[in-house]
Image (tube, rainbow, N blue to C red):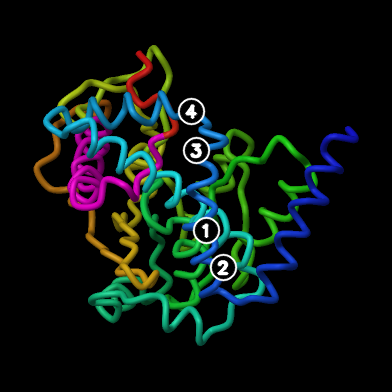
Amino acid sequence: MRIKHRIEYFFFISFVKYFQLVGLKKTRHSANILGYFLYYLFPVRKKVVKSNLNIAFPNKSETEIKRLTLKTYQNILITFLELMYLPFVSKKEIDESISIHDIEIVKEKLSNNKSAIFLTGHFGGWEFCLSSLSQKIGRPFQLLAQPQSNPFISDYVMKARKTFGNEIILSGISVRKLYENLKNGGIVGIAGDQRGSFEGPRFSFFNRPTALFTGTANISLKTNCLVIMTAFERQPDYSYKIHLEELGFNDLPERNEDKIRELTQRYIFFLEKHIKKNPEQYFWLHKLWKY
């Protein structure tokens, strides 16, 4: 392992221990403060963030775009520090942090070991809430995730996501395992707003065409599982309002390829609706309209 990785991990785990001591509430407050430092001193991909915001919200002033850019960095820090804190979170902290409308209806739909995909995006508190949602639902999730470049940090992050009995499936390695899990009545959590390939289909996202991941729609059609679109909206007090909406499979085209396109677009419109209400809570650091 590289010396660089060990040094990075030393500072990382030092932060983890500190936030474990101060508790979840102060950890979230600290993220807001650290967001200022990230924005002004280490502006990673600031040009990309501003470009994305200008494309998505062409009528917003430059002052408003700057404000949203700063808020975006603060949102990223809150999300990341919540993930660091996950191994230490208590049931009480989850109950105080998460509010889910119609949770009993969802539980009823999942009765009799019904399989489901909880389809979310990189919005709000997706790390904290998606991992914690299994505790509220009462069944473990399989979470599709990507490893980090630093193997030590990656190992910690993967273990954090396994809190509450969840299982991690590395993307690109075992799609078959996800398929088998859904066929056997399992529950899967996926962030479905990842960029697709250059050759892949295009979808309307903020009225601009972009390539997006279509695997979720494909798997859901093959397994006939329930798909619940999910948005984790952060509130001013750092709690979360979780919006759950079943993805409709009604009025689909005849061809399977067209069905996949239509289902993916329906999800993207759901995500876009929530981003428009809280644009600073989206992860704008990726080149969403790269090609």
Choose the circle earlier in sequence order: 3 or 1.
1
Residue 40 is tagged as 3
Say what amino acid the circle numbered 1 marks: Ala
* Contact, mark 3 vs mark 2 (Cβ under 8 Å): no
**Mark 1: few/some/many CA within 10 Å (<14, 14-19, 20+):** many
Amino acid identity at mark 3: Tyr
257 left or right, relative to 214: left
Residue stretch in magenta:
259-284
Q: Image point 36% across, 73% down: which residue?
A: 237
User: Looking at the picture, does residue 275 appear above or below residue 90?
Assistant: above
Give the mark toward the camera: 3 or 1: 3
Residue at 50% of width from left, 81% of height from top? 93
Percent x, y for residue 264? 27, 37
Is mark 2 in CB contact (under 8 Å) with mark 1? yes
Query: Residue 266 or 37: which is nearer the viewer?
Result: 37
Residue 273 located left or right of residue 95 = left
Q: Earlier in the sequence, mark 1 or mark 4?
A: 1
In the figure, residue 266 lies in which quadrant? top left
**Quick check: marks 3 and 1 in contact, CB under 8 Å?**
no
- Tag 3, which secondary structure? helix
Mark 2 surroundings: few (<14), some (14-19) or many (≥20) residues within 10 A: many
Mark 4 vs mark 3, foreground winner is: 3
> Dot 2 corresponds to which residue?
27
Find disc 4 in the rendering and name its residue.
45
Q: Nearer the viewer, residue 109 or 273?
A: 273
Instruction: Give percent across and percent down for residue 51.
Output: 32, 24
Q: CA distance from mark 2 to mark 4?
A: 24 Å
Work out whether residue 11 or residue 262 is closer to the camera in this orientation and state it: 11
Residue type pointed to by label 4 = Arg
Q: Secondary structure at mark 1?
A: helix
Q: CA distance from mark 1 to mark 4?
A: 18 Å
